[in-house]
Structures are given as C-alpha cells and as structure tokens.
Image (cartoon, rainbow, N blue to C red):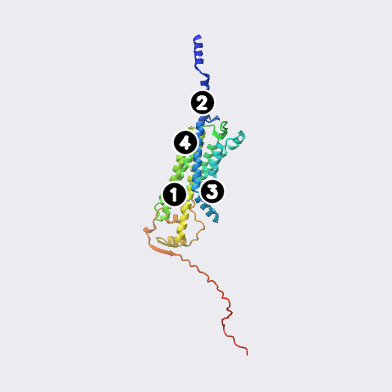
Amino acid sequence: MAGLQMRHEDVNIELDPHLLSLFLDRQITVIASSPSGMDGDYISQSSYQLTTYLRIASVSIALYDFLETAPSTCRYIREQWNAPHMTASFSLFLLIQFTSIATLALSNVGYFYSHFTERSCSHYYLIPSIFKVIQSTVSQIILGLRAFNLSRRSRLVGGSLLVLLIAATALEGLTNLYHRTAVLDPQFGNCRGVFQIVHLGAWIYYVVAIIYDLTTSTICMVYLNKYKTASNSFFAKVSRMMFYDGIGYFTALTCVNILNLIIYRASQDIQTAAASLGYCMTWIMSKRLIIHLHEISMKRRIDTADAALSSSQSISSVYSVSHVVRTQFKPKASTVSLDLTIPDFDLEDVELGTDWAEDGSAHVRVEKTVQVERRSRMVYELGDDSISPGPSLPRPR
C-alpha cells in the first residue's frame, strides 16, 4: 500500500499543471479541426490562413477570367438582345453566369463576414450549399445537352442522359444538405455548415460529379470521332475545337474533384476552400464551352456573308439533289447559333464521315443571283412650263 502511494505521489510530482493545460488545449484544437470532431467551434490559426489563401486565389482566378471574357460576353448579349428569340445556349449561359457568381459570393461571405449571430447563421448556412447544387446542375445540363445534340438527338442517348442527370442531381443535393449543421466560430465570427456524419458526406458528391462528367465526355468524344472525317473544312474545325474543349473541361474539373477527395480527411474549412476552387473552375469551363461555339458561329456568318451564294457538289441521289437546292434557297434566320453543337445542315452532309465525291454520278451547280433595282431620282426643273404636245384633237366646226 505504501509502495502504491509512493508511485501515485511520483506521478503527481512529474505532471506539471502548466504542461498539462497546454497538452489539453492542443488536443482540443486537433479534435476541433478533424473530421471526427465536427462539433468543435475552434479553428486553428494555420488552418484559417491556408483556407483564406485558397479562397482568395479562387476568387482572383474567377475575376480574371470574367474580365478576360467580358468583350465576348458583351457581344453575345448584344446579339441575343437584337434576335427575335433567345437560344437555349444563351439561356444556359446566363444561368451559369448568375449561379456561379452567386455561389462564389455567398460561400465567401459566409466565411469572411465576422459579425454573424447564432440566429443569422442558422438561416444562412444552407444557402451556399443550395447554390452549389444549382450551379453543378446547370453545368451538367450544358454537358448533357451538348452530348445529346452531338448524337443527333438520339432518343436512347437523350433518355439515358436524363436519367443520369436526375440521379446525379438527387445524390448531390442529398450529400450537400443532409445532416449539415450550422457552426458559428467564436474566434473569427464566421458561419459554416459542417457535416455531423462521415459516411454520407462530400466525397459522394465528388464521385458522382466525376462519373457524370466521364459519361457525357465519353459520349461527346465518340460522336466527334465519327465526324472527324468530314470533308467540310468548317465542320472539321468545329469538331476539333469541341474535342479539345471537352478534354479541357473534363481534365480541369476532374483534377479539382480529385483534389477535394484527397483533402476530404483534412479540416472542413480547407474542404470548403477547395470547393470554392471547384466553383471557379466549373464556371470558367462551362462558360467557355458556350463562348467558343458562339465565336466560331459568328465567324461562319461573316464568311458566309462574304462568299458567293453558289454551290458545286458531286451527288449520287435524287434526294441529295433536292437537299442541295433547298439548302441554297432556305431563308436564313437572323441569328445563327451553333446551340451547343454543330449546325444541322452540316450534319446532314456528313452522314458519319461519308464523302460525296467518292461515288458521284451527277453534277449539279446551283447559283443564286440577287439583282437590286434602284429607283431613279426624280428631277424637277424650275422655270420650264412647257407642255409636250399630245395627240391632235379634231376642231369643232
């Protein structure tokens, strides 16, 4: 008993109260910053600084790209404003612009604003997550519509993409909003939404996003590979541009999603900062998919207006003769838009890579001539009251 008491006293002598206090404080900080300690309200200074740097970097990249694409955006808006109706591409362009700006702004306001109260935080913490899901859905609609149009609006492809889009949106919404609670940081005063469970969390969101992007990108690549043998130089240029844009979109967003998966076990503040980088990349890549198609569409309009309205083509069927004649005299719309894909009249001429010149048995040349008749300007001469003599009338007797 005496020996036990001596050992107990030795332990009491070795444990310094000041060191014990520092040790406990350190443990609380680690627990508050780890995924398992999601109830903690304390953020370490180093974690806060790293998160701040990542958020500022994402906002800076988004702002730079916004200013760089501002001239193209203004031209696009001006053209659509004068058009008789808005295209689907322009509607999605406006949606991705609005939702991306709102998502970035709301996410960073919740982090940098330091005067939240418990009541205001409880009303605010879900708003950034809701806009995150909306932005992701709009971006996925752009990709899905692009793949659907490249498949020449195949019902099978369209139905499959619709089911995949609904499933992806449901899973992304569930994993972003389910069991997310508000946390008001007592040190920095910001408002965060954190998960209380680990098994159903943000990692499912990023896995679903990667699967959807991979599926739609694969469909686009398959059809673009079929169209690459087109003899039409403009069509080949569009296909090549869409191919590289699709690769760039998939690579950029997949890298960001994989980065989010890697740091999933880190602090939730760092997770949200990496998510802010994801908002930025989603906005940039989705917007550029539409802008690039619009720019090449404008170039085609200019080239068509400058070129002669004539067509010389070797064809092999009566239907083809009729098609060539109709396309030459078909009235053009005031606004020509590629609408997330290539023009329909170019697709009809390709037929998955068939070249007309290989088996042509007839030669048709269609020319369209437009003659402008100008009215001669009427000239009135002053001081001339003469009347030209008309037919002579018989005099009365």
Give the distance between the C-alpha atoms of the residues marked 2 and 4, in whole angstroms. 27 Å
Closer to the chain start, of discs 2 and 1, is 2
Determine whether the residue tagged by mark 2 lies in a helix, strand or loop: helix
Closer to the chain start, of discs 2 and 4, is 2
**Residue 242 numbered mark, or none:** 1
The answer to whether the residues at label 2 and label 1 have Cβ atoms under 8 Å apart is no
x, y (%) of residue 397?
63, 90
Would you say residue 161 is visible in this rendering? no
Amino acid identity at mark 4: Leu
Closer to the chain start, of discs 4 and 3, is 3
**Residue 94 numbered mark, or none:** 3
The answer to whether the residues at label 4 and label 3 have Cβ atoms under 8 Å apart is no
Give the distance between the C-alpha atoms of the residues marked 3 and 1, in whole angstroms. 20 Å
Residue that appears at 49% across and 37% down: 54
Front label number (2 vs 4): 2
Amino acid identity at mark 3: Leu
Residue that appears at 43% across and 56% down: 349
Residue 394 in which image quadrant: bottom right
x, y (%) of residue 367?
44, 65
Front label number (2 vs 3): 2
Give the distance between the C-alpha atoms of the residues marked 2 and 3, in whole angstroms. 48 Å
**Residue 26 numbered mark, or none:** 2
